[in-house]
Image (tube, grey):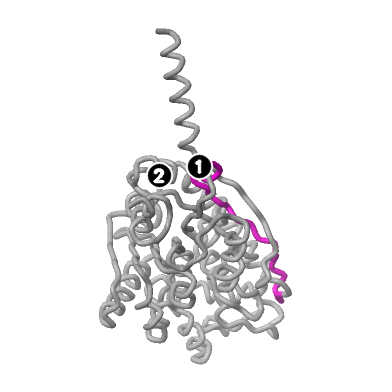
């Protein structure tokens, strides 16, 4: 009897061990970020989840690419803020999704956000994701190197990036999921009347803006937060190396307390907003296997529910098949955990719409 109990215990331990995936961190020099003019570091980090059966075989796997939000990093997104490993292990164990590789690239910058956009000043952040990171993964891991087996998702700034890169690189990614996508267009707290533009005019240099941002957590100074966000956006939406202090032009500047609007710069920003990009990427959007966005009804940033709905309505007007959903939640409270959106919506989405992997081969 004792031998049987010991045997069962060893079997349980063995099964538990097999059910555990692995989380590892890698770094590499991103060619698309080299020789940038803003002194951004081209040495980039990746947090990679390998499924439980990865080291026991030779099969290849679909890959989900995860884009973090403003102020985040790969490790914060995958390990600190949301325990992706726990969610992925359980999803694979329970059959919610088949074994897949999941990777989050570090896209943080000196001003805390790349907005996943190519820039003549800060480097080519769109190419970094769609070319450098994808090529690194295909070269160093047993991926299925095909668009139908690549999914792209992100939260907030990362949700913006997922929609944007999904349009620009529909030949690389086939399924796209945007969680609470930020700054899809002007509205509400993200508008030309934002007090962040006035704060930028007062601070007027990178060091002061970064310092104010660092102190904003303690002081609750939201204007400083927006000043940093808007400056980060300007460096990729309207870069200008001749502006020695901020390396960018801005849609709004201030002379004293008076706002001065710059239509040509406003136009440059709007060209980069996903809402306006839809008009120019209809074939690419229609080529996607699946597209989904969702947002919380009680969102902390007022522009997100409105612009997400408008984005969905625009897709609908063009008869682009997609999913859009509002749920009861705020900017992040319903993402993690076994009752959250990632476990119950995002992972099953990719299980359904990505090709390849053992479970589909066996079907």
Indicate yes or no whether the magenta region holds residue 43: yes
Q: Magenta segment range?
A: 36-56
On the question of residue 201 being in view, the answer is: no
Asked if marks 1 and 2 touch (Cβ < 8 Å), the reply is yes
Identified at 42% across, 69% down, the residue is 174
Left or right placement of residue 197 versus residue 349 in this view: right
Q: CA distance from mark 1 to mark 2?
A: 9 Å
First reached walking from the N terminus: tag 1 or tag 2: 1
Looking at the image, is 146 positioned above or below residue 246?
Answer: above
Identified at 50% across, 32% down, the residue is 17
Q: Nearer the viewer, residue 140 or 269?
A: 140
Looking at the image, is 310 positioned above or below residue 25?
Answer: below
Q: Position of residue 344 (x, y in %)?
A: 32, 50
Looking at the image, is 234 positioned above or below residue 92?
Answer: below
Residue count near mark 2 (Cα–Cα under 10 Å), binned few <14, some 14–19, many ≥20: many
Q: Which residue is mark 1?
A: 21
Q: Nearer the viewer, residue 155 or 243?
A: 155
Q: Position of residue 173 (x, y in %)?
A: 46, 69
On residue 295, the disc is none
Looking at the image, is 285 positioned above or below residue 12?
Answer: below
- The residue lying furthest to the bottom in this view is 264
């Amino acid at each position: 009897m004792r031998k049987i109990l010991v045997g069962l215990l060893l079997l349980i331990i063995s099964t538990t061990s097999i059910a555990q995936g692995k989380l590892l961190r890698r770094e590499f020099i991103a060619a698309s970020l080299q020789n940038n003019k803003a002194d951004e570091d081209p040495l980039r980090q990746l947090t990679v989840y390998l499924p439980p059966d990865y080291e026991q075989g030779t099969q290849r796997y679909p890959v989900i690419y995860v884009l973090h939000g403003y102020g985040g990093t790969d490790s914060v997104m995958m390990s600190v803020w949301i325990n992706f490993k726990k969610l992925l292990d359980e999803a694979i164990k329970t059959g919610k999704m088949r074994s897949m590789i999941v990777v989050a690239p570090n896209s943080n910058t000196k001003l805390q956000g790349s907005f996943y956009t190519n820039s003549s000043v800060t480097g080519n952040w769109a190419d970094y994701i769609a070319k450098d990171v994808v090529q690194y993964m295909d070269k160093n891991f047993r991926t299925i190197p095909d668009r139908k087996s690549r999914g792209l998702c992100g939260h907030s700034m990362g949700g913006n990036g997922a929609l944007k890169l999904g349009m620009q690189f529909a030949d690389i990614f086939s399924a796209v999921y945007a969680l609470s996508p930020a700054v899809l267009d002007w509205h509400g707290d993200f508008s030309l009347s934002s007090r962040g533009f006035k704060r930028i005019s007062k601070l007027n240099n990178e060091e002061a803006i970064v310092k104010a941002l660092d102190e904003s957590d303690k002081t609750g100074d939201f204007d400083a937060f927006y000043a940093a966000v808007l400056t980060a956006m300007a460096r990729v939406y309207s870069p200008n190396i001749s502006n020695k202090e901020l390396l960018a032009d801005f849609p709004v500047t201030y002379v004293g307390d008076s706002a001065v609007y710059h239509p040509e710069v406003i136009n440059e920003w709007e060209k980069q907003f996903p809402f306006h990009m839809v008009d120019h990427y209809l074939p690419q959007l229609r080529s996607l296997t699946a597209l989904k966005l969702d947002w919380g009804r009680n969102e902390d940033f007022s522009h997100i529910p409105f612009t997400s709905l408008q984005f969905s309505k625009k897709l609908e007007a063009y008869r682009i098949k997609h999913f859009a959903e509002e749920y009861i939640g705020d900017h992040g409270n319903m993402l993690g955990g076994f009752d959250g959106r990632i476990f119950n919506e995002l992972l099953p989405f990719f299980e359904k719409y990505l090709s390849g992997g053992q479970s589909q081969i066996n079907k």
